[in-house]
Amino acid sequence: MRRAGNGSGPGPAGVGGLAGVPGLVANVQHFSLHDGPGIRTTVFLKGCPLRCRWCANPETQSFRPEPGFDRGRCLGLKKCGECLRACPEGAVSAGADDRPDLDRKKCVRCAFFACRNKCPTGAWKVFGDLMTAGEVLEITLGETVFHQRSGGGLTLSGGEPLAQPEFSRAVLALAGQAGLRTAAETCGCADFGTLGMVAGGLDFLYYDLKSLDRARHFELTGGDNAPIVGNLLKLRASLPGLRLTVRTPVIPGLNSDEGPAFGSFMRELPGVGYEPLRYHRLGGGKYRLLGREYGMGDAKLGPETWREFLEGFRRTYGGDGRLPDGFPAAAAAGSSGEKNSPPVRH
Amino acid sequence: MDRTVLSPQETRLDIINSGGPDPFLAGRARVSALVKNTAGQKPVIDVERALWFTRSMRETEGRPLPLRWALALYNVAKNMTVRLAEGQLLLGRVGPPGRHCILYPELDGDFLDLAVGTLPDRPNSPADISPEDARLVIDEIAPYWRGRTYHEALSLALPEDVRRLTYADPAGLVSRFVVNETSSFRSSIQWVHDYECVLKLGFRGLSEIAAARLAGLDPLDPVQQTERRPFYEAVLTAAEAVRLWAGRHADLAAETASRESDPVRRAELLEMAAIARKVPWEPAGTFREAVQSQWFTQLFSRLEQKTGTIISNGRMDQYLYPYYARDKELGLADEDGALELLECVWAGLSEFVDLYVSPAGGAFNEGYAHWEAVTVGGQKSDGSDATNELSHLFLRSKREFPLHYPDLAARVHSRSPASFLRDVAETIKDGSGFPKLINDEEVVPLLVGKGATFAEALDYAVSGCTEARMPNRDTFTSGGSYINFAAALEMALRDGRMVKYGDARLGEATGDPRGFKTYDDLWEAYQKQHVCLLRAAFVQQAVVNKLRARHFAQPMGSLLHDLALKHGRDLHQEHIPEGLDFGYVEFIGYATVADSLAALKKKVFEEGVLGMAEVMEALDHNFSGYEKVRAILGSAPCYGNNDPYADSIAKKLDRVSVEFSAKYAGSLGVNLDIRYVPFTSHVPFGRAVSATPNGRGAWLPLSDGASASQGADKKGPAAVLLSNFNSKNMDLSARAARMINIKLTPGCLEGDEGTEKLVSFIRAFVDLKLWHVQFNVINQQTLLAAQKNPDKYRDLIVRIAGYSAYFTDLSADLQNDLIARSSHGSV
Ligand code: SF4
Ligand code: SF4
């Protein structure tokens, strides 16, 4: 990823027009196959209003850049020690096993992130680089031969694209000018004006809905689902042409009993896709990088629970057997659910 | 990862490992019996071909070589034991039951007696030989050839400065692994015959053409009488040899039938006998006859000479189609019957192992390499799409047949139908790495640019790993040079020396690298070494091209070639009028060199965080105790990430090579195009090169083909293709294949959606005008498990280079290399 001058800072939004609008980007994923139609370039923005306990991208939650530390990549202080010497704030100290320790309270996210810049191994990462909309576009267009052939394009993800509306809008407008197809992934947690503005520039939207139970939603995500659900319904009404897919991460013991509830909910939204996502623990390692605790312990989503969710959904969604776009094909095949699906190893 | 999607191949292994029945075998009794003993079996060497060939050659000394060759083949055809495999529908094999190989003493007879002792136990591609056969080799075959082989002549003929870069010993038996010749591993570069002319005319029709040419010679012209006459006599003799050989098989089948108690098999044998009495001498009439005719032809061409890693099968879906369509219409053939017959061909193919006797040959072609490329798809010579029913049938067979045969290549172009590409993608997803893809949009314009007509270029067949051949226009048969450019890099850092070879200066004197002030100084030193190796390769080729006509002939192959037949010259002659000569020089270690130069440019000459002295110290210690230096170097931009910094260096490396070829290939009168196709040579080449500045440890494999360095591609397979595009010099034409390996986990291609994504990936590859791409669809865990429990994973197939092989047949080095190649997950 390109690192826009953290020290000099970008010019005012007006100077470069849309191309100059700055945003905080956690990561750009190339050759992304699962964030919308076709082959895509996915831009993960930094900052999210919710705090889901299972979040697989915890590095995108905070609205500020933050250093992360990967112990496994560090050469050890005796052999190297560059970061220790580089930190102007004394936030990096000698820790156990000859590895540095970070005192996050002391870290001021100094200019150029001295710890990262001096580290030869990439053990230090900084999640959150300032990039301009123009830079994001340039990277994306460099891969466009793949987008064109696959019906793919650019996906804004997060974090929460709606939490950086100016930037998201600028990227989408530039993408539109360049003839790129666009998609976004949102948790829907914003005022409707913002959602409408961003969604207006999209060809495809993934809309995450974690629980239909208001109290539970609050408990799981730290946010109220009433505006999220409200926004979804309003959006459906105001932009009927937008391809929309609702997604629910199925989390063992937290919302895995809500299959029937989601089935009846989605039944009222004909033409909207629905994609349940199997809980996975892949984000777990990142919590360690950030010096945080993973809130999910070692919970696992068993095949039974997953099947129950899918079957519950199907029961209430409708009797004619037609399932929404994006719903796992295996479950549609029959009650065994596994017959036609590729084998799964646990 | 708590959820893993398995490829069908992995699923099959899982079922078998948990005691279940092999899903392939159900309903395929015949083919299952044929393939039962092939997987994982150590091949046996059969000496008959070598013996009868040698005995004839001994008697014909002094006569014109093509004629001697034809007489030797006739002797083989007459005396070699003919055998038929139980249950086979096809007649013709060149060795005993099971996996077998044959010997070509004209290549390596001088050390064959020593080699037979070591072959059974060598680590790369071993083979067994019976004590009686070993005695024949030691007492009769090797003694005749000593002093007469091509390989001895080459070793003597190379100028000393080039010789030093080629061999590490006086006898020319030990490779230097700097500028390797491959012309002594095989008598011909990978080749495709015009099988269609055999099906249409039969050897009889071809003989009539040759006889007419012979009759038309001017009886008073001394050149015609001494050069052309023996050539035509040779091709006529070769045709008779084929006829005799097929006839002996027919006799055997008839005789076996008379003793057969099962009436079904008896009828089969009688039909086989009848077919073999007809083809390949007469034109084929039915699909069954066409397949048998082609099979005899390719088998006999194995007896004729060693074509690098087995002769290719050409555009099978094209030349067999008329017969299939006709039979189907007449109700004589159906899909299942055709499938069974084709699987009999694959079973037959799988029993033959192309043995490389020389250690270098074995190391270059690990895992019993075979590139009998069956081409499907592509365009017809009028430019329309060529896909037909058989193209799909071949793909289906590829998915269902359990061995890694045949080596299947799909030609793709900008209008390849979606149904074909979807079928191709489904087959790739099966996980055995097939088919490999060759792109018409790159190949056809390059062939036309080098002198082919559009009709010829559009009808090319994939040959071997990645070559494109026009069977009646290509006339170049010499094996090419492989250049270890990582060695050039090492020499640029060590004043022309290499750690492995001590004080001997192999390259140019370019001074102490600690004195390099700028990147330009480094580049200049590197370029000198680079050009020094290119020069050696081209000199090698000049010697090779002249020498080979004196050592090899291929009368049968020449009979099948329009130009050879027209001009009365054996295909091994240096130049054939109207012919197009496409030779290759292999660039090995592309990303290793590009990444190393990028690392030094960035970290030493631009950022100044390291000094050359420090880097050299670290390299001298193989980074041990210098982990920080290694890490700093490793953090520089790498080729394969669509990063202009590294890609522009790679482009310059390509440019220097292509420009050299543009300038000097012409003086040899041939095309010597720059290619990036290592087979498995990046492993032995790596063993010659000490630590490199991209952080690669000493003696480890170099980067593979035009792929990124192992583990250096961080941005996914799209970026690997883009880097290849970025680093090509589209304004110049002295280029050929870039081999690109992409490893994907089955998870990223799950379901119909995954298939569609792979299809669009392929379409983008076509748009980018890259020559070749192939996929490994496998889980890292599967590879690790197979390494731990080889017995459980004997038939795990992985794609290595231009071919796929059993994972467990590979050396530990190569296994680790495959595991280390970044696997592009889907997370
Ligand atoms: S970002 Fe700057 S202040 Fe924070 S730990 Fe790194 S070097 Fe210290
Ligand atoms: S700079 Fe990086 S490698 Fe060096 S001690 Fe710090 S974390 Fe470890």
Image: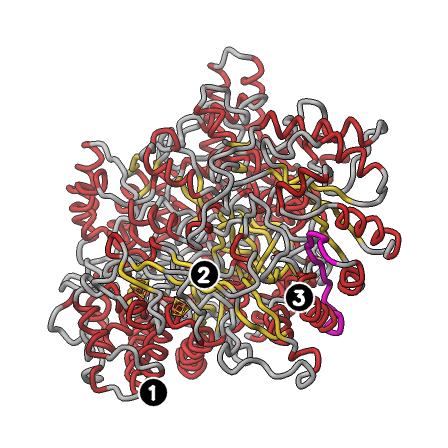
Of A177 and B510, the residue lying toward us? A177
- Residue B520 — which label? 1
Mark 1 surroundings: few (<14), some (14-19) or many (≥20) residues within 10 A: few
The answer for how far apart the CA atoms under marks 2 and 3 are is 31 Å
Q: Which residue is mark 3?
A: A164
Q: Which residue is mark 2?
A: B713
- Say which element carries label 2: loop
Residue A178 on the magenta segment = yes
Question: Foreground mark, 1 or 2?
Answer: 2
Left or right? Give the position of A145 relative to B642.
right
- Say which element carries label 3: loop
Chain under disc 1: B
Mark 3 surroundings: few (<14), some (14-19) or many (≥20) residues within 10 A: many
Chain under disc 2: B
Q: Give the vertical position of B221 relative to B659 (above or below).
A: above
Which is nearer the N-term, disc 1 or disc 2? 1
Of A153 and B478, the residue lying toward us? A153
Q: Position of residue B482 (x, y in %)?
A: 34, 65
Chain under disc 3: A
The answer for how far apart the CA atoms under marks 1 and 3 are is 45 Å
Q: Position of residue B336 (x, y in %)?
A: 65, 29
Q: Position of residue A182 (x, y in %)?
A: 72, 62
Residue B135 on the magenta segment = no
The answer for how far apart the CA atoms under marks 1 and 2 are is 26 Å
- Say which element carries label 1: helix
Q: Residue at x 52, y 36 (%)?
A: B3
Q: Are marks 1 and 2 on the same chain?
A: yes
Disc 1 marks a residue whose amino acid type is: Asp
Q: Which range of residues does the magenta coloring cover?
A: A176-190
Q: Quadrant of residue A99?
A: bottom left
